Image (tube, rainbow, N blue to C red):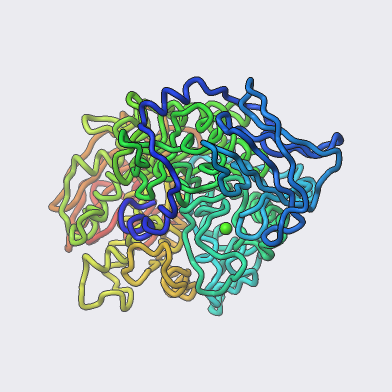
Amino acid sequence: MKLTLKTLAMTAILLGPAPISAQTNSSYDRQFISWPVYSGDDLELTVNDRGTSFRLWSPKAQEAIVNLYDNGHTGKPYSTLPMKFDPATGTWSASLPEKLYGKFYTFRVKNDGNWLPETPGVWAKAVGVNGKRAAIIDFAGTDPEGWENDRGPGMKNFTDAVIYEMHHRDMSMDPSSGIANKGKFLALTEEGTVSPLGEKTGIDHLKELGVTHIHILPSYDYNSVDEANLHENQYNWGYDPQNYNTPEGSYSTNPSDPATRVREMKEMIKALHNAGIGVVMDVVYNHTYRLDSWLWRTVPWYYYRQEEDGSPSNGSGCGSDLATERSMCAQYILDSVLYWAEEYHIDGFRFDLMGLLDVPLMNRIRRELDRRWGRGEKLILGEPWAAAETAAVPGTVLASKEHLTELDAGVSAFCDNTRDAVKGDLWSEDAAGFVNGGGLDADRLACCIKGWASGPESVVKSPSQTVNYLSCHDDWTLWDRLVYTGDKALRFQRCPPDLLRQNRLAAAIYFTCQGCLFLLSGEEFARTKQGVKNTYASPLEINQLDWTRAWANRQLADYYRGLIALRMRLPGLQDKTAAAGSRVLAGTSPGKDCAAVLLDNTGAGSPWKRLFMAYSAAPEAVSLTLPQGDWDVLADAESSFAWQKPRAIKASAPLEPVSALILGQR
Ligand code: CA
């Protein structure tokens, strides 16, 4: 999530009503320490042969009840059950001898003498339309055929991760997608879809591109889209979590049927797994859609950080920072991640504003995922920053950029250093990076190649922690940035060849950096959002992928395809160990705005023992002196598939204007 505009624009709505008496952070934290923690897997709802039972964790509630409903969103409860308190676990229980499949429920707790409004609890795994009531469904009925044998591709099958970030509506809404289930989970189950110009779209496009994972923008139940009145123009990224453990209803074909969203999300995941593609889910455990959330109504304040004066902490820009350092909050986040991995076979998690979560929790999540699925099989990546300071308990070590080396080597973070070095400082609109005329900082470029994992400016302990990217949902697309810093007379009108050269060079740089790779959907065909940066609620015309552009910029897309395929053959770039930086054998600057790096590429699966990678942002060709011996051209200014039929060169080579030249030595 972005730090500024999106959140500021949303803050007024998100703060919502605050029927809350303030207590100071320190006194409240002291109070919480003595609370019993409950880690049973029967929290909130269990249905088995003994019937239906409810168990709500709310240690300081004075009373609690369960309301039972026939309907997911209207009418009065048909029954209300009192709940019984167990002081040893801090939980409230009630049960009935029947299996209540098809029914809905909410809880209410009495706190400080007042009954709080209804909540479906914090563990609703199925919900009615708009997520106001939890639903009781038989999960066995939500599994697609063959689900028991469904497996994500796992990292065993990949030498590297190339993650493609997408929003369900962006991917399929435009008529040019040729996809029938527009804006739905099912869109990615459709094979054989093409644009009017014959270009592959949807899942076939992903297969052709060669990405290893897709990253889906928030797909748990969020608040900002009215599921009961869906229409074309409703759009939101979804960084406003409501029910953390339920899929979003607007992406299902029937949000009023609680099982449909569950089944259809599983069908999407299964289709991707069948295509050999893993699924990384965006998880927003740093804040809720507003302070008066289901979490707050279940256990007032417990899940939230407070300032000393009692006001809610606002490091998220949404006034509802979660207190991840508290025992039950940490347990909740961990269990939620494990639930998605187990029930939905999710292959990785992208933590929004990870800088608001704490290091011990992130490391614990890494350990538990590794223990169940094998070391590194499930990806963890996150944004190592926050919107502002957060009121964590003093002494809490946050998973922010300055603490990345305290994280497990298997917890990765978005690398703003490389992003800004290549295309320009994010926070300065007119700033250009290396590819668009900002000049060469050779030391900085060398740090990029090493994934910022070694040398005096290192920020991570090994390249496994670095996510290289040039565009994501936040801010300008890469293309829009290049347009803005390029010829302003042509702004957003067409695709001038010089900007396409800059785009190819930019791609060649980050695809030859050590670390993981990440790109915004459509970056490979010069996606534009018409210069709009913060499109979290922008109209579809701004957000949806125009697949005719994929045809118009097919050469650029081919260049990305070739780079992905080439990278999979270059162990020197995939090395994730702390020693990877020592593979950089030498760096030179063969001319103004030119840099070249010699790299040790020994390792399984590659015929090339050394790589010589040169990058030029200069307007004229430069004669490049090659290190001794014969070299194969693997990629040049125009083609990244040259490695398929490598031509041999020696001694010197022309380095074209604004281009990369990647050579391999056998
Ligand atoms: Ca929703």
Q: Position of residue 133 (x, y in %)?
A: 65, 52
Q: Name the residue located 31 percent from the left edge and 66 percent from the top edge.
A: 480
Determine the image quadrant of residue 503. bottom left
Left or right of 38 on screen, residue 318: left
Left or right of 318 on screen, residue 540: right
Q: Is residue 621 visible?
A: yes
Determine the image quadrant of residue 529. bottom left
Tell me: residue 505, above or below residue 466: below
Tell me: residue 332, above or below residue 149: above
Left or right of 391 on screen, residue 291: right
Give the image quadrant in which the ligand numbered 1 is located.
bottom right
Q: Name the residue located 59 percent from the left edge and 72 percent from the top edge.
A: 194
Q: Is residue 188 visible?
A: no
Tell me: residue 523, above or below residue 27: below
Determine the image quadrant of residue 500. bottom left
Q: Position of residue 666 (x, y in %)?
A: 40, 39
Comparing 29 with 204, the one in front is 29
**Total residue callouts:** 0
Comparing 71 with 402, the one in front is 71
Q: Position of residue 155 (x, y in %)?
A: 56, 38
Q: Name the residue located 26 percent from the left edge and 52 percent from the top edge.
A: 422
Residue most extreme to the left: 592
Q: Position of residue 593 (x, y in %)?
A: 16, 53
Comparing 11 with 241, the one in front is 11
Residue most extreme to the front: 113
